[in-house]
Image (cartoon, rainbow, N blue to C red):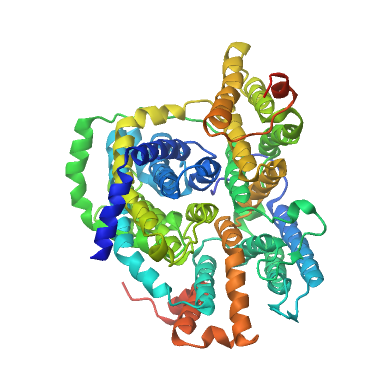
Amino acid sequence: MSDQPQGKGPPHRAVEALVALATIAFAALIIVGSLEAGIDWGAEGPKAGFFPFYLGLVILAASVVNLAQAFTASGSRGGPFASWRQLGQVLSVALPTAIYVAAIPYIGIYVASALLIALFMVWLGRYGVRHVAPIALGVPLVTFLIFEKWFVVALPKGPLESALGF
Amino acid sequence: MEELYNLFHGFAVVIQPFNIMVMIVGIVLGVIIGVLPGLGGANGVAILLPLTFSMSPTSAIIMLSCIYWGALFGGAITSILFNIPGEPWSVATTFDGHPMAQQGRAGEALTAAFTSSFVGALFAVMMITLVAPLVAKFALQFGSAEKFSVYFLAFCSFVGMSKEPPAKTIVAMMVGFALAAVGLDTVTGQLRLTFGYTELITGFDFLIAVIGLFGIGEILLTIEEGLKFKGGSTGINPKVVLNTWMELPRYWVTSLRSCVIGCWMGISPAGATPASFMSYGIAKRVAKNGDRFGKGEIEGVVAPETAAHAAGTSALLPMLALGVPGSPTAAVLLGGLLIWGLQPGPLLFVEQKEFVWSLIASMYLGNVAGLLVVLTCVPLFAAILRIPFSIIAPIILVFCAIGAYTVHNSTFDVVMMLVFGVIGYVLKKCDYPLAPLVLAIVLGDKAEEAFRQSLLASGGSLGIFVSNGLVASIMALGLVALFWPLIQDAFTRLRPKPAL
């Protein structure tokens, strides 16, 4: 949208440039990988690296254009990417989610989900135990019934579930 | 005539009780998905895809396509009542829909939106019924060079028609193709681009990418914008509905024009979002009271909604007939076909008649069911939006994680989902389009296969792509689409402006 983010933050141009550099690095990776797989003509036609090699070249060329445009951009692109406050909010969702994802293999998806919902409700929503407990426990429980019982799809389980005999 | 017989057979399959139930469940889930921020048609379908593994392909596609219709309907509810477009294609609906709601005419606006959506979808389904079998029959004669030229045309249209900068569209698309190339090479069976990581042998699954890019990325965007729901009541009742229906036929020209725009934009992979904007823009320019658009004109709701739904529906035509999806959601449906063991493309019309025609029949019935469900249950769906974000956000995150895990029963995929989510957030903020990226992941292997087989046939000469009239003209069309902005520019510069 055309709304300018409120307050100070990292400049949009810098982020644009970083993204362009990242895609250049990605292109380099693809090109190196393709060369390893072989880009010339083999017994069964073009080798495995043939197609990705040219993809890498196209990404490289287009990224260079993007990089150049990042510095010449004007208008809203000249402003901040997002305010630090907004980025803080994004992190307040992204970080717990990252911990949640990391915890799933160890404590199972049900316990992790209950903790994630409880954390959000207490931390961002400032709810009391009376509101948090039914939702944080109810959602994983209903999910358990739907997936494990109804559709017979096994989701990752942890020590709690094995203690309960599942 | 044979098509008509097949269609009736399809209807007979669809009205089996289980399929009707699946249809209603799909519509309701779809509306909920469309109403909730952070869940959209594409990732909603992606998350629910694993639940359909145990169903027959026909029931599964009915459910998933109904989720899609539901999501298309649902987007309008939040646009009109809360001025928050639940889906990008309903942004244009907010221009006149929300002012109408503020004037206490929410019921009228909602009825107009739902009815227009229905009209647009119906028009597109009739078009699919008539045109898809012909296209499929034609496409049956395609060799690998022609196949590649169709992919080429589809992806070139993205570059030429999207509003994002061309270089960014190209990067997004090519990154998708490159991700699709990771893992086992389908032609030689050789491993490539895995750099020794065993997790990468199976490559990147587009479902994970969809859930991450559209689901997690969207939630991060939503939280950044700071959600505040301020919504009026729905004010919908049978009298309002009937009165609006009496008024709507007056706008038949706008409807028809929007249907045509929608179908055109849906088949070429421009998609529902530009279709809705274009239709709104043209209606505003052409209408008698065009200067009052934006202040609560019912015509300003009719135009974008009709076009968006027509485009969303007709995006399934190239998916069914050619195996080239016209939108991210169509791409997910296509992925579903592959998982259920069906080969999308023209052969589907020959080998899987019952499946194809049941799907088409379910489009007719699903949209009727959708219209009834949304008209009667709008207050309920609007209530969902009043659930605070701090409760709904973690629940959506949990569903995304479950959806990502169930694709391959792998926790590595859940990690990848989060990575895609953060990437999606940054790319979206920097104006990189995500739809071509996802489409490229889905079609990457097939496009590459067609390309390499063509080269194999020609002994390495690119001349095969201009070797006959058909392939040459499709390739030429592709190039025109690729350079469309430049061509348009040149035209406006060459032609002197007419004196007013």
Q: Residue at x 48, y 64 (%)?
A: B323
Residue B118 seen anywhere in this rendered image of the structure: no
Position of B289 compared to B200: left or right?
left
Q: Nearer the viewer, residue B1 or B403?
A: B1
Relative to residue A66, is residue B72 depicted above or below?
A: above
Relative to residue A118, is residue B18 depicted above or below?
A: below
Q: Nearer the viewer, residue B97 or B28?
A: B28
Report which quarter residue B253 is drawn in. Answer: bottom left
Relative to residue B253, is residue B29 depicted above or below?
A: above
Q: Residue at x 48, y 60 (%)?
A: B325
Relative to residue B374, is residue B1 depicted above or below?
A: below
Q: Residue at x 29, y 43 (%)?
A: B15
Report which quarter residue B356 is drawn in. Answer: bottom left
Q: Residue at x 68, y 33 (%)?
A: A156
Position of A65 compared to B34: left or right?
right
Q: Position of residue B27 (x, y in %)?
A: 39, 39
